Amino acid sequence: MSNQSIKFLKVINPANANIVDEIPMDTASSLASKFTLLESGQAQWRQKSVAERLAIIQRFGEIVKTNLEVLAEILTTETGKPLQQSRNEIRGAQNRIVHLTAYAEKWLATETFDTPSMIETIKYEPLGVIANISAWNFPYNVGYNVFLYALVAGNAVMYKPSEYASLTGLKMAAYLYEAGLPESVFQTAIGDGEVGQALLDMDFNGYFFTGSHKTGQHIAQSLASKLIPVQLELGGKDPLYVMDDIQDIRQAAINAAEGAFYNAGQSCCAVERIYVSSSIYDEFLSHFVEEVKSYKVGNPMSADTFIGPLTRSAQIEVLEAQVKDALDKGGQLECGGKKLPGLGHYFAPTVLSAVNHSMSVMMEESFGPIIGIQAVDSDEEAIGYMKDTVYGLTAAVFSQDKERAIDVLESMNTGTVYWNCCDRVSPNLPWSGRKNSGLGSTLSSQGIRAFVQPKAYQLRLP
Ligand code: NAD
């Protein structure tokens, strides 16, 4: 990356392809200066108590609440997320601050074990200056999971928002400073993959990445020789199995559709494939298609829009290819299936039935408003299909019978399992992917400890 020439990042509104803003990208030399600043800031920041650091983050939460409407409009303008869903995300992400308030001191506290001749102590030291390379689809949730937790643990952070959520990232930085966070403790790296790549060549004390499997794998390979903590929160192909014992088939279909189509399916834990017991398949499918056809697709600024444009225009080709592949192999198109006319990146909400595992729509991450629904004859058959994936983020079962559902969920090799819910994250619980879905955990006690390193003190009494 050149040190000299400053390039500009075009922020494009995916609803109409208008250029909203052009912001200067970082260069190798600006990143180097920011890193030096963060190193000096971290030395001071780590001396503060957890309570002092937390107080600043709490003030940041209050400022975000006060500016909710401004922030929601920015998020909708640069990502196309329907305005109400932007508000939901910003409000919902506050639960990370509630979680830190309740548990940070407990999980960062020094532990001491007294033995007859020794004092044995564990102190949790911050990692130092960490890089947070982030995604655009839920920038508040996935950003907070890393940078708020890292800051409270005493680290300085270089936050690289996605190139599709950079205005949001810059606002977050401004509000953190307004809350009292020194600029020497938090800096943004603005730009595309090239700027992300430049961060990999620098000497951060840990890298925390949220994004695609392809980029995550590249990051892990590039950093392997540094022998430093690397966490990866990657994609998924999350299955939902609807059992034949559910009482309200229509409601199950409505809930499943929301899990698949919320944020136009651009959620790492969106339902990406559905298996339904054969005996209720036709009824479930008909309710599901009716629900999806009722979704209002359109301007994300309108109050009643449920499906907005896709954030990245390139994903439209991926979805078109999945539809073609499914139809070529005998799948049935129930609704949607194509890009909508106009300049915006809209793809019609799409339901495919009569699908199977020879089709890419059942095997590869779609990350869009599309779903395949397949009939199964037994729990064993459903388990076989649910496990037939290179991913391991979440798996869900809808059923009246808890024992039967848990039997299925215990056999899943995923970081999260759901019974009668889906597409959900709780700060009380570890958020982690297995296999191609990632490495390490955010949230919960694990996600607090992810940003510190233990030091063992072995002190012999004289
Ligand atoms: P992406 O991999 O394209 O980009 C993620 C970030 O990596 C961006 O900031 C990008 O600029 C940066 N980047 C790109 N190339 C890089 C390089 N060579 N070196 C360093 N950084 C580089 O992913 P995306 O499109 O932003 O996000 C979508 C993906 O993220 C989906 O697969 C989704 O499932 C996943 N995701 C996972 C979680 C989770 O918690 N598991 C949460 C949200 C999104």
Image: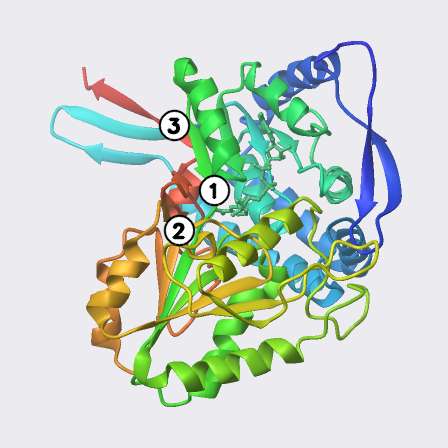
For the question of whether residue 270 can be seen, the reply is no
Q: Are marks 1 and 3 in contact (CB under 8 Å)?
A: no
Which mark is in front, 2 or 3?
2
- Outermost residue on the left side: it is 116
Residue receiving disc 2: 393
Q: Is mark 2 within 8 Å of ligand 1?
A: yes
* Alpha carbon separation for disc pair 2 and 3: 26 Å
Which one is in front, 220 or 321?
321
Element under label 3? strand
Depicted 209 relative to depicted 197: above or below: below
Point out which mark residue 234 bears. Answer: 1
Q: Position of residue 75 (x, y in %)?
A: 75, 52
Residue at 53% x, 19% y is 204
The quadrant of the picture occupied by the C terminus is top left
Element under label 2? loop
The three-letter code of the residue at mark 3 reads Gln
Q: Is mark 1 within 8 Å of ligand 1?
A: yes
Q: Are marks 1 and 2 in contact (CB under 8 Å)?
A: yes
Residue receiving disc 3: 453
Q: Position of residue 427 (x, y in %)?
A: 47, 55
Which one is in front, 156 or 17?
17
Residue at 57% x, 36% y is 151
Q: Position of residue 182 (x, y in %)?
A: 70, 30
Q: Position of residue 26 (x, y in %)?
A: 75, 22
* Alpha carbon separation for disc pair 1 and 3: 23 Å
